[in-house]
Image: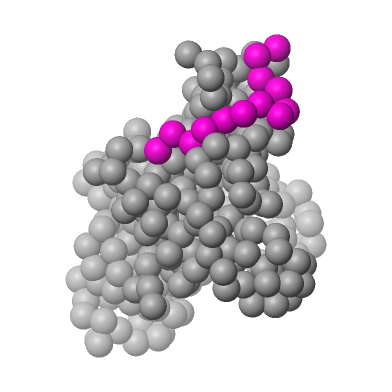
Amino acid sequence: MTDIFEVDQHITASSRYYAGKVGSRFFVALRDEKKILGSHCPKCNLTYYPPRSTCGRCFSQLSESDLLEIGLNGTLETFTRIDYEVVSVLARDHESIHPKVDPVIYGIIKLDGADTGMAHLIGEVEFENLKIGMRMLPVFAETREANILAIRYFKPE
Amino acid sequence: MEQELINIPMVVDMPYRFAAGCYLARFLTELRDNGKFFGIKCPNCGRVQMPPRIVCAACHVKNGEWVEISHEGTLMGFSIVHLPLTDPTTGQPHKTPYTYGIVRLDGADSFIEHFIEVEPDIAKVWVGMRVRAVLRPREQRTGDLNDIQHFAPIGEA
């Protein structure tokens, strides 16, 4: 009888995300002004995060003039805890800037004024003390780059 | 003013393990520890599968008879690759051009695909070419198909 044998494998995939016109406005506002932008569809009266140039519901063309500030605070919609090492999902020059420590708490926060939630890390709170419906606020990074980790995490108000 | 357009480089890094199962485990440990290839013979149709499978896919009966397979075989098909395809283990483009092919080892009825160490020149590689497996040194072998470094032509260089 053969012992159980596991083969270690590894896949690495490099890619580049192009934010586009509307997405670039979002990342620049986040980095330079600590503002979170969503896009508002006037026909559906819905505000989307992340901002996009097409309404996913009525397919209206949205533009930069449909961008509006949302948040910064919001309501915790759901959350989860990750107990294995989180591998990098964002990298600059292959240097991981994603936290690798565990446990990591992820949540979805519906920012004030938005109709869709933002997934982000949750910090400065024990997992046991989190509750759906809790009010949350973002903690910005001191040195911010044009990516989503310009917000380090959300914490309870 | 011209808008600053944002792009974000991303690296998805996925280490994973796959459980080889008892047949493939024996194949891989024999390859790693003794540098030998083993296939499995179907008791019904007599074909030899390498890498070994528990069930003969043609007859749907359980394979049971282990047979040692030669390190020499015949090139059954090949590509000269000019596109710098991403090497999934490093995330880096593979240096081009290179030759990749399928080999039927003597004693087996199935093919194994791997790098063929020949000059990537359509005039210097042909279907029916005799090749031999070149294994990594014992201390570098880990028990996966990369323990085979490549297949090299027999009787040249």
Residue sitting nearer the eye, B56 or A145: B56
Horizontal side of residue B145 vs A125, given as left or right: right
State the image quarter where residue A93 is shown. Answer: top left
Task: State whether residue A69 appears in this view.
Answer: no
- What residue is shown at x 64% (from left), y 43% (from top)? B104
Q: Give residue A102's position: percent from left, percent from top.
A: 24, 68
Q: B92 above or below A71?
A: above
State the image quarter where residue B147 is shown. Answer: top left
Q: Give residue B152's position: percent from left, percent from top.
A: 51, 27
Residue sitting nearer the eye, B50 or B80: B50
- What residue is shown at x 29% (from left), y 74% (from top)? A83
Horizontal side of residue A131 vs A40, given as left or right: left
Horizontal side of residue A108 vs A100, given as left or right: right
Question: Is residue B102 one of those drawn in magenta?
Answer: no
Q: Give residue A99's position: percent from left, percent from top.
A: 27, 56
Task: State whether residue A142 appears in this view.
Answer: yes
Residue sitting nearer the eye, A82 or B50: B50
Q: Give residue B139's position: percent from left, percent from top.
A: 24, 43
**Magenta span of residues:** B123-135
Residue sitting nearer the eye, A126 or B135: B135
